[in-house]
Amino acid sequence: MNTDFEQHGCTGCQQTPQWRQDFPIEWEGDHYVSRREMVKFLTLGSLLLAGANWVTALASRFLHRGSRAERFIGLASSLDQTRSMLFRYPTDQDPCLAVRTPEGKLVAYSQVCTHLSCAVIYDKAQNGLFCPCHHGLFNLEGQPVAGPPTRPLPRVQLEQRGDRIYAVGMEG
Amino acid sequence: MSVRRQGTILFAAVLALVATAVVIQLWLLTVSMEALLSGEFKTLVPAAAGSTLLLAVNAGLLRYVFHFDRDAHGE
């Protein structure tokens, strides 16, 4: 069956059919523009990611500064009797543990295990800080020596003034 | 080969490079966040510097794309 178009031709549009006038974009042009726009979009994302990285780096400065506050934690004479003492530093939500080593050295660490955040306790028999949840063990340098923990405990910097002990900062 | 076809192929190559750089930046951000939360602050500034370097590479490639696009329209 012949259509009207086949019989009479497309008068007025022999050069360009109607659909071509309605959709003048070639696939080639579409790919060209979409890839160019995608490069722009990804570069904008790259800018945001770099910004987020710097925000993270600057946030660490503020956190580090905040941990330098000084706080009285207890008396050296009472620590000498008990060998270990619990305190909170730098905030009331951060449990820490001070230990008088057998050599007489005073050390203190965060009590939060670096494995799954259980509280570590001083173990006189093993001469280390023991995590009862998964049997992790840290030596008195704060380094993991047994069990699942792989990262050291954050160390609390202490200062002894007479009989009084002060926490003055955090390391790591 | 037409300039537009050349541009399409070129933009695809640039897009692959930029996408790779963005994935590396995402990885750097993830590592930085993990380091921040675990209190290991030493790696944060080098990670941010690396991310900025990748941004500079991406910006350079984008500039090249803009130049190519302008030249293509000029023809």
Image (cartoon, rainbow, N blue to C red):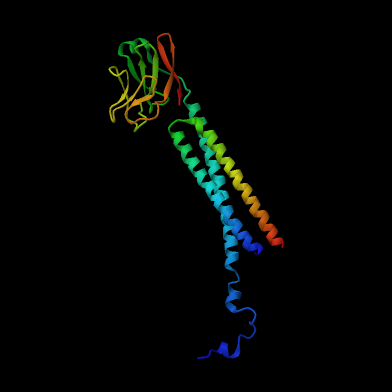
**On the rendered structure, is A93 left or right of A1?**
left
Q: Does residue A19 lie above or below A30 as drawn? A: below
Q: Residue furthest top?
A: A162
Q: Residue at coordinates 57% horizontally, 56% vertically from top-left?
A: B12
Is residue A36 at all visible to an observer of this figure? no
Q: Residue at coordinates 59% horizontally, 41% vertically from top-left?
A: B53
Q: Does residue A93 lie above or below A168 as drawn? A: below
Q: Residue at coordinates 56% horizontally, 53% vertically from top-left?
A: B15
Q: Quadrant of the C terminus of chain B?
A: bottom right
Q: Residue at coordinates 59% horizontally, 53% vertically from top-left?
A: B14
Q: In the rendering, at what x and y percent does residue A32 appear? A: 60, 61
Q: In the rendering, at what x and y percent does residue B65 appear? A: 64, 54
**On the rendered structure, is A137 left or right of B8?**
left
Is residue A26 at all visible to an observer of this figure? yes
The tally of labels here is 0
Front-lying residue, B9 or B73? B9
Q: In the rendering, at what x and y percent does residue A12 appear? A: 65, 84
**On the rendered structure, is B20 left or right of A124?**
right
Q: In the rendering, at what x and y percent does residue A109 appear? A: 39, 22
Residue A11 quadrant: bottom right
Front-lying residue, A147 or A64? A147
Q: Does residue B55 lie above or below A117 as drawn? A: below
Q: Quadrant of the N terminus of chain B?
A: bottom right
